[in-house]
């Protein structure tokens, strides 16, 4: 496949919040959506981060509410400054149910064309799975985003370059091989551990994240080829009693959101998957230029491309609609806000009226999610996305173009298909994961 890959700056953490605690964490979730001018309360026990929404860190955010969990992917500093204090205030038995990735993650965007969605997912994820690199995969309306542990960033570049067909967009500050400039701000710290953790007692020693870690199991050796990868994936899922299921009556819409400016031709793009991208940078999103014709970058920091925070471009109605939907504790809502990518929403069709004309794209479509509850697997489990997607692409009828999307959340996965293809896919997955006896 031909694909353009760009690592975004900063590091991320994944946070799993059980649904019974969603209302407790609604305020922290809304806090990370506040405009960048809003500082943290001075009483917050955290490092001196000042304005924690600094432009340098507003590169990627995903908030997903599904029938299985609430999942947040946010900058590491936000996890520390916003969510850690909220977790520390919980009773010990509730705090233990929250999971946060110990690994810091880097995220890269992938712009590709010329192949069906299912094959694209497989081509992107299979090489990484065979290299033993754990990933989280998030399909948005215009792009694919893949999260990898920061400690594996060099291996990701080497693996995808070895496969061929991938073009890496160089970032300022990287060496000639493009390693150091990808997904890492100067002075950032890469966590060396490959193990996830659950929160233990908040009084267990020295406080903070480091005093609240309970290790989980390490990874297993990677498979040698795609066939073995699929075999191992389904053996693992079956051993952990993962049963694919659909929620009765739940239908999803995948679309984009309007923006303040006409960057996308009147405040939003109609392109999306399969319709080509607009904009000059190949991402479907054109950057902003100052009046003097120069890129509007952050003053006082090393030169790099324009850093557009989503708050700079998101339409006010879309912004308030997202907040309203989150307050309603939706049955399903996944919002992805990323640097240089329009807002992307995967949402319960029942929520469409709440957003009105702030949505862009096919709101009449109906998609069906097939859920995989991965709560019994560690964060660093490998091969799940590639193994499941690969098997579906392999076994789906050849006449069908498998328009498959995948949403990784902190402790679950969802395969997104059309209604007809979801029936076929469920018929493939259920026998493979059926318990013996």
Image: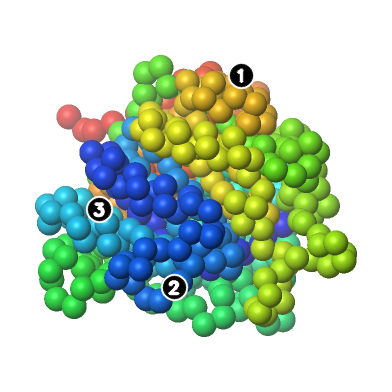
x, y percent for residue 127: 56, 58
Residue 364: which disc? 1
Residue at mark 2: 49
x, y percent for residue 164: 70, 61
* Residue 249 seen from this side: yes
**Residue, x 52% and y 25% (percent of image)?**
354
x, y percent for residue 283: 73, 51
In this rendering, position of residue 249 left or right of residue 95: right
The answer to which of marks 2 and 1 sits earlier in the sequence is: 2
**Looking at the image, is 165 positioned above or below residue 433?**
below
**Residue, x 67% and y 31% (percent of image)?**
360
The answer to which of marks 3 and 1 sits earlier in the sequence is: 3
**Looking at the image, is 334 positioned above or below residue 136?**
above
Distance of mark 3 from mark 1, alpha carbons? 36 Å
Viewer-closest of 326 and 124 = 326
Dot 3: within a 10 Å radius of its alpha carbon, few (fewer than 14), some, or many (20 or more) residues?
Answer: some
Q: Kindly check if marks 3 and 2 are in contact, taking CB atoms under 8 A apart as contact.
A: no
Q: Nearer the viewer, mark 2 or mark 1?
A: 2
The answer to which of marks 3 and 2 sits earlier in the sequence is: 2
Residue at mark 3: 98
Q: Secondary structure at mark 2?
A: loop
Say which quadrant the C terminus sits in.
top left
x, y percent for residue 240: 25, 45
């Amino acid at each position: 496949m031909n694909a353009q890959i760009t690592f975004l700056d900063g590091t991320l953490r994944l946070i799993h919040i059980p649904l019974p605690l969603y209302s407790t964490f609604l305020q922290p979730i809304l806090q990370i959506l506040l405009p960048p001018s809003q500082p943290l309360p001075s009483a917050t026990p955290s490092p001196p981060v000042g304005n924690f929404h600094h432009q340098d860190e507003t590169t990627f955010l995903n908030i997903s509410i599904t029938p299985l969990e609430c999942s947040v992917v946010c900058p590491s500093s936000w996890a520390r400054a916003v969510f850690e204090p909220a977790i520390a205030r919980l009773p010990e038995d509730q705090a233990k149910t929250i999971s946060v990735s110990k690994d810091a993650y880097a995220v890269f965007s992938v712009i590709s064309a010329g192949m069906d969605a299912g094959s694209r997912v497989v081509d992107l994820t299979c090489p990484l799975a065979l290299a033993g690199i754990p990933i989280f995969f998030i399909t948005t309306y215009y792009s694919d985003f893949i999260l990898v542990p920061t400690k594996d960033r060099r291996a990701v570049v080497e693996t995808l370059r070895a496969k061929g067909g991938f073009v890496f967009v160089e970032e300022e500050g990287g060496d000639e091989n493009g390693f150091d400039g990808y997904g890492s701000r100067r002075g950032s710290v890469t966590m060396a551990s490959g193990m996830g953790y659950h929160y233990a007692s908040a009084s267990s020693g020295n406080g903070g994240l480091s005093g609240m870690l309970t290790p989980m199991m390490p990874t297993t050796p990677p498979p040698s080829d795609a066939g073995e990868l699929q075999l191992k994936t389904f053996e693992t899922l079956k051993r952990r009693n993962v049963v694919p299921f659909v929620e009765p009556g739940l239908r999803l819409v995948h679309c984009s959101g309007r923006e303040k400016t006409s960057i996308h031709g009147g405040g939003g793009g109609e392109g999306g998957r399969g319709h080509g991208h607009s904009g000059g940078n190949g991402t479907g999103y054109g950057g902003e230029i100052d009046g003097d014709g120069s890129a509007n970058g952050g003053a006082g920091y090393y030169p790099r491309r324009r850093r557009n925070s989503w708050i700079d471009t998101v339409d006010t109605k879309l912004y308030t609609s997202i907040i309203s939907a989150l307050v309603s504790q939706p049955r399903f809502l996944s919002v992805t806000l990323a640097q240089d990518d329009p807002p992307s929403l995967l949402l319960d069709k029942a929520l469409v009226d709440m957003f009105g004309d702030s949505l862009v794209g096919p709101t009449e479509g109906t998609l069906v999610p097939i859920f995989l509850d991965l709560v019994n697997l560690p964060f660093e489990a490998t091969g799940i996305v590639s193994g499941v997607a690969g098997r579906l692409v392999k076994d789906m009828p050849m006449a069908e173009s498998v328009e498959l999307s995948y949403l990784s959340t902190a402790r679950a996965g969802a395969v997104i298909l059309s209604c007809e293809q979801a029936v076929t896919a469920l018929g493939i997955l259920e026998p493979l994961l059926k318990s013996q006896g």
